[in-house]
Image (spheres, grey):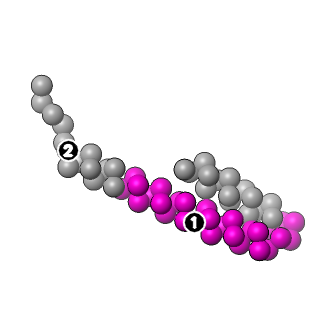
Amino acid sequence: MLSWVVTFLVIALIAGILGFGGIAGASIEIAKIIFFIAVVLFLVSAVIGLARGRTRV
């Protein structure tokens, strides 16, 4: 997912340099949304991993 964020940021930078403000703004918003989704999924998996703990053999 983080590779998607980087891809959309690069698209936004290129579009901004070339003067396509609408495309640049949309790409930045998509990158923000995907980044926050990735952070939330990371936190959820970290909490679940801590809640399960380690099993003893």
21 to 30, vertically: above or below: below
Residue 12: x, y in percent?
Answer: 73, 63
Assess disc 2: are there few (<14), some (14-19) or many (≥20) residues with their C-alpha within 10 Å of its C-alpha. Answer: few
Whole-percent x and y of residue 16?
80, 68
**Which residue carries the number 1 mark?**
32
Q: Amino acid at mark 1?
A: Lys
Amino acid on which the number 2 mark rests in the picture? Arg
Q: Is residue 37 left or right of residue 53?
A: right
Q: Secondary structure at mark 1?
A: helix
- What range of the chain is rendered magenta? 16-43
Q: Residue at x 57, y 66 (%)?
A: 32
* Residue farthest to the left, as pictured: 56
Let me know if residue 17 is in the magenta part: yes
Q: Is residue 27 magenta?
A: yes
The residue lying furthest to the top in this view is 57
Q: Circle 2 is placed at which residue position?
A: 52
**In terms of sequence position, does the residue under pointer 2 or pointer 1 come before the other?**
1
Question: Who is closer to the viewer here, 20 or 13?
Answer: 20
Residue, x 71% and y 72% (percent of image)?
25
Q: Residue 8's spot in the image, x, y percent?
A: 68, 58
Q: Is residue 43 left or right of residue 19?
A: left
Residue located 36% across and 56% down the image: 43
The quarter in which the C terminus is drawn is: top left
Residue 29, how many percent across, how many down?
62, 69
Left or right: residue 52 versus residue 33 is: left
